[in-house]
Every structure is written in C-alpha cells, then in structure tokens.
Amino acid sequence: MANNVIIVPARLASSRFPAKPLAPVKGPDGLVRPALCYTWMAACSAARALGPDTWCVIATDDDGIAQMAKAEGMEVVLTPTACTNGTERCAAALEVLGEKPDLVVNLQGDAPLTPPAMVAAVAAMITSNPDLAMATAAVRASPVILDHLQSDAAAGRVGGTTVVCSKSGRALYFSKSIIPHVSPGSTPLESVLLHLGLYAYRPEALADYSAHGPVPLELQEGLEQLRFLDAGLPVGVAVCEAPGWEMIELNNPTDVPLIEAELARRAAMEPA
C-alpha cells in the first residue's frame, strides 16, 4: 500500500471525559504520559505495518494538545473548532495539509490499545472492495468486555459501541447500547460485536461525508459513522481476531486503570 496517512483526531472538549487526550496514564515502564502518547505509539506501529509510504499526524483544535504533541515529537495539524467529530476533523486535516493520499486511516485518540494487524485488516478491506466508502473494525465481545459494557450501562455511563452487520459484512447499525440485546447474566451471543475506534476512508468519501452534514441518529447516538449509513454510503466491517489483551477504549475516567492494566498485559506478551 502506498501514500497512506494515519490521522489521530484529538479534541479537548468531551462531555464524558474533558481533556482526555491529556489524561495521565502510567505505562508498563512506570512512566506517566498523556493518554494521547499511547495512541500515537499505536499509530506509528500501524504505519510500519502499512508500509514505508505511510505517515502519521495528530489533528486537533486545541493549542494545549498541539504543544504537548509537538513536545513529544508528534506531527500536528490544527483543524477548525467547528469540526463536530473525528471524521470531519480528518477531512479538515486533509484540506489544511493540501494532501490527497490513496487512503486515510482514522485512529481515534481514545483507542491506544489498537494493534497494527487491525489497522492493516481495515485498510485491506477497503482496498480490496472498491465499492466501499469506508471500512471499520470490530471484535467479538468477550465475557469481560460484555460485562464492562453492561456495568457501564447499569451505572448510567456511556461506554463502548456495538455494531450489527449483514451476512456480507456490511454495517447495518451502530449503537452505544448493546445490540443485539443481551439479557444480563445470559450467555454472550457470537453476534455481539464491539466496534473499535478505527476507520479507513477514500478521500472522496470524506468529502461526501462533510457535504452530507449531520443527521438525527448520528446526533442522538453520538456516533459519527451513522452519517455514512444515512447517506447510503456502504460501510464494511472487518471482524478481527481479538488480541491477547482487552480492547478497552478511553471513554470515561474509570477506564484509565483498566487501560493501564491492559498496557502492562500487552507489554508482558512482547518478546524480551
């Protein structure tokens, strides 16, 4: 694959977890870094998996995030505060950069546990299916993940996102509720898929997305990808094998210790 860009959208404002890109997270080496640093590391690892012509950039509207990122050696582009979500921010970043890559990967700033293989799987899916406007990733919800989702729901927290697909692997709907419904205490269904904060787009699809404008279900669920479905743009879902750690995203402050534990668990699995 050539001429790919991995964009990591990062914004300061968040109703669930304000300033979460700057939240302190302890790494396996015992050092505390802003959370965004770990997603940047994941993006750089993914770039190596996609090939030598893949590069990474942080897209933010906040000077504080930009200054921190630059100090940590990240490439940064400032995007308008008017961007309502990460996909709009990716589209804006391309305009600011003046670039038109073959493929745009959006690795959301709250997904530091994303393995390179998943990025490669999503990129491969859209590359091999020219009718797709966008591709994204999911894993089958483990009992631990399902319990995490149900605990968040019981506590009134908005946690992870689930997705249901057609037999052909096209997305039918995404929700911050658990879909399909699973009764508490029941055996998890294989069809419960945890959606991950990872997207691959064709540049022209990003332009179509921005032109379409926000839609009611997108705003109600707080899920940007629903705009693609509303616009009739086909979305592929790469159902990936779960890695040896739990794919927990940084949605709430309570997720920080869980992510720290999974970072340590992942490091213990890596060759010495």
Image (cartoon, grey):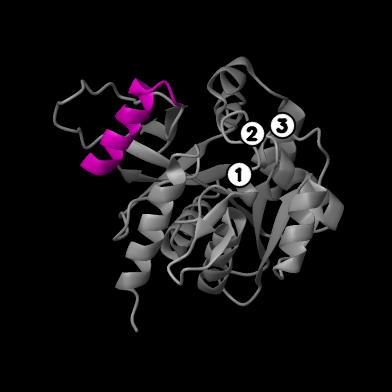
Q: What's the amino acid at mark 3?
A: Thr
The answer to whether residue 168 is seen in the rendering is no
The kind of residue on which mark 2 rests is Ser
Q: Which residue is disc 2 drawn over?
A: 14
249 in the magenta segment: no
Contact between labelled residues 1 and 2, with CB atoms less than 8 Å apart: yes
Q: Which residue was labeled with disc 1? A: 20
Whether residue 150 is in magenta: the answer is yes
Distance from the alpha carbon under mark 1 to that under mark 3: 17 Å
Q: What residue sits 59% from the left and 23% below the top? A: 218
**Marks 2 and 1, how far apart at CA:** 8 Å
Residue type, numbered disc 1: Lys
Q: Is residue 183 left or right of residue 176?
A: left
Q: Which mark is residue 84?
A: 3
Q: Residues within 10 Å of mark 2 (few under 14, many from 20)?
A: few
Query: Residue visible at 32% across and 36% down?
Result: 148
Which one is in front in this view, the residue at disc 1 or the one at disc 3? 1
Instruction: Mark 2 or mark 3: name the one nearer the start of the chain.
Output: 2
Residue 119, compared with residue 157, is above or below; it is below
On the image, the x and y values in percent for residue 202 come to 64, 49
For image coordinates 36% across by 56% down, the residue present is: 261
Residue 241 placement (x, y as % from top left): 30, 55
Q: Position of residue 88 (x, y in %)?
A: 72, 38
Total marks in image: 3
Q: Secondary structure at mark 1?
A: helix
Q: Quadrant of the C terminus?
A: bottom left
- SS under mark 3: loop
- Badge 1: how crowded within 10 Å, few (<14), some, or many (20+)? many
- Quadrant that contains the N terminus: bottom right
Residue numbers of the magenta segment: 142-157
Image vertical order of residue 60 relative to residue 55, above or below: above
